[in-house]
Image (spheres, rainbow, N blue to C red):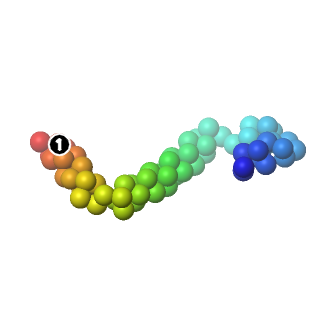
Amino acid sequence: MLVHDALRQEHVTARLRSVSYETYKARKAQWDERLSEGIQRKRFNRDPAAYLSDLEQLWAGLSC
């Protein structure tokens, strides 16, 4: 919905071109982190034992 609204705005391409790639990358990383947090929260709420088991396995693999 928001994308369609944005695409109908005047001068949208000029506004997009005015943003540096570094700024875009930083904002995208923030957005991806935010989405990742939500996904992790949903996985935990759905099955806490499985989520924690996966974390323990990940931790064990990193510490070896």
Residue 21 falls in image quadrant:
top right
Q: Viewer-proximal residue, 53 or 19?
A: 53
Q: Amino acid at mark 1?
A: Gly
Residue reaching furthest front? 46
Q: Is residue 37 visible?
A: no
Quarter holding the C terminus?
A: top left
Residue at (37%, 55%) from the top-left corner?
43
**Residue 1 image offset from top left, x and y in percent:** 72, 49
User: Where is residue 18 shown, x and y percent of the image?
Assistant: 74, 41
Q: Is residue 56 left or right of residue 16?
A: left
Question: Which percent across, then down, holds residue 22?
Answer: 58, 41
Residue 11 in view in this figure: yes
Secondary structure at numbered mark 1: helix
Residue at the right extreme, as displayed? 10
Who's the residue at 19% across and 44% down the image?
A: 62
Percent across and percent down for residue 20 are 65, 40
Horizontally, residue 21 falls left or right of residue 4, namely left
Q: Nearer the viewer, residue 50 or 58?
A: 50
Query: Is 63 displayed left or right of 31 in the figure?
Result: left
